[in-house]
Amino acid sequence: MSYDSKRDAHTKLVLGMADRQGVDLEEILLRGEILEDQFEDAVNKCLGCTQPVACKCLLDTAGPQINLPDYCRNGDLFDSLAPK
């Protein structure tokens, strides 16, 4: 898998996991509530994860909301952006 396609896959994982936490990262980016660098940091954290297959399976099989798995490296970000 090329770096670009791997990065695209992890970008989708980040967006999908955020969405399941009630966080629309794309909208938040557009509104300027987080910087592009912060989003890229989240994708980079995901790239370093050892469980992307488990994450993809979870996103593919779970309902509209899921609890973050313990291994998620972006939990703090999602928690900080989640609607209160």
Image (tube, rainbow, N blue to C red):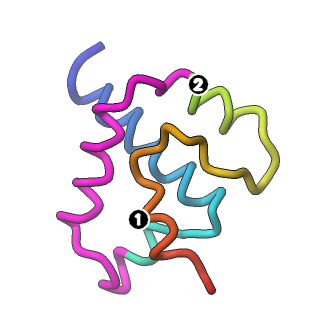
Residue drawn 35% across the image and 40% down it: 46
In the picture provided, is 3 more to the left or to the right than 84?
left
Secondary structure mostly taken by the magenta-highlighted segment of the chain: helix
- Number of numbered discs visible in the structure rendering: 2
Residue 68 colored in magenta in the image: no
Give the quadrant of the C terminus. Answer: bottom right
Label 2 secondary element: helix
Q: Is 16 placed above or below 34 here?
A: above
User: Label 2 amino acid?
Assistant: Ala
Q: Residue at x 51, y 69 (%)?
A: 79
Residue identifier under label 1: 77
**Going from the N terminus, do you reach mark 2 or mark 1 first?**
2
Determine the residue positioned at 47% across, 27% down: 52
Instruction: Pinpoint residue 37: horizontal percent, then vertical percent.
Output: 17, 64
Q: Residue 38 in the image: state x and y as whole percent.
A: 24, 65
| Structural crowding at the residue carrying mark 1, measured as other residues with C-alpha within 10 Å and reported as few (<14), some (14–19) or many (≥20) | some
Q: CA gap, disc 2 to disc 1?
A: 20 Å
Q: Is residue 44 magenta?
A: yes
Disc 2 residue crowd, few under 14, some 14–19, many 20+, Cα 10 Å? few
Residue 57 sits in which quadrant? Answer: top right
Q: Residue 54 carries which label?
A: 2
Magenta span of residues: 29-53
Extreme-right residue of the structure: 63
Judging from the image, what secondary structure is the residue with disc 1 in? helix
Residue 56's spot in the image, x, y percent?
58, 30
Determine the residue positioned at 22% across, 67% down.
36
Image: 9 above or below 33: above
The one nearer the camera, 55 or 68, is 68
Name the amino acid, label 1: Leu
Residue 12 location in percent, x, y?
46, 43
